[in-house]
Image (cartoon, rainbow, N blue to C red):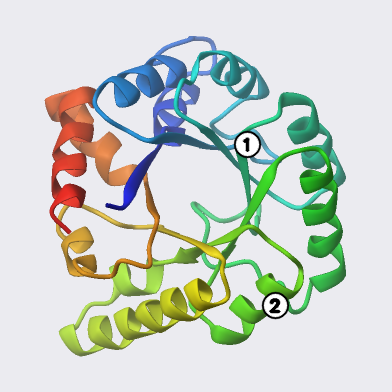
Amino acid sequence: MAKLAVNVDHIATLRQARRKINYPDPVTAAMAAETAGADGIVVHLREDRRHIQERDVRILRQMVQTKLILEMASTSEMLGIALDIKPNLVTLVPEKREELTTEGGLDIITHFNTVKESVKHLQNGGIKVSIFIDPDLDQIKTAHKMDADMIEIHTGAFCDATTEIEKEKQFAKIVDAAKIASKLKLGVNAGHGLGYSSIKRFKGLNEIDEFSIGHSIIARATISGMEQAVRDMVEIIKNL
């Protein structure tokens, strides 16, 4: 059965909307997610610190009982933080200040040398590395060449598709990507934009080891509570 890693960034987004308060706390949300059955906690420490703060990551490292996944850009600053905090997994992602959320996968063909060096440093520090990439076969082969432990397939184009024809086209790319990565002995995660309906399309795609889901769970949690929102998603994934 595929696992679920819950991204709690948007709990911090709500907190940072009023800079002088310390609630809601993403650490508390992470504990509730674990109680409800999450297999991991994801946070993205951005260069501009728009939501998650370094303090959050350090406390989460002490508190998380499952695994802590740190999403970050491939920069010297973030490498230093990761090697100090020691999350269970680092996911290297692209990052632009002007974007609302991550808009696509990291182009590791163009940035091969920089990303490969980051992968090497993190692995030498005892941290497993995933790379967030589009479902593109050349990108997947490149991830394999740079000895990444796993990839996370960017599912945004599938989730954002407005017609069934386009959804089928984008989902076919995800299927091909997952199967190729699996054959190359890469771990396969998937995420970005997935919700309670779109996740059901992945039934039978057994090559995916874990789904990383945040916004849809946090959105439901504002109505039904964090634990219930996570339990609802865990139950759906159990039946894939």
Is the residue 45 above or below the residue 205 in the image? above
Q: Say which residue appears at 76% left-offset and 53% top-offset.
A: 74
Sequence-wise first label, 2 or 1: 1
Total numbered labels? 2
Q: Position of residue 222 (x, y in %)?
A: 21, 28
Dot 1 amino acid type: Leu
What number is the disc on residue 45? 1
Towards the viewer: 30 or 129: 129
Q: Position of residue 104 (x, y in %)?
A: 53, 67
Q: Say which residue appears at 60% left-offset and 77% top-offset.
A: 140
Q: Mark 2 to mark 1: distance in Å?
A: 25 Å
Q: For label 2, count other residues whose C-alpha is less than 10 Å away and answer few (under 14), some (14-19) or many (20+).
A: some
Q: Secondary structure at mark 1?
A: loop
Q: In the visual, does 161 lie left or right of 141?
A: left
| Mark 2–mark 1 CB contact (< 8 Å) | no
Towards the viewer: 15 or 130: 130
Is the residue 146 above or below the residue 65 in the image? below
What number is the disc on residue 142? 2
Q: Quadrant of residue 26?
A: top left
Is the residue 31 above or below the residue 17 in the image? above
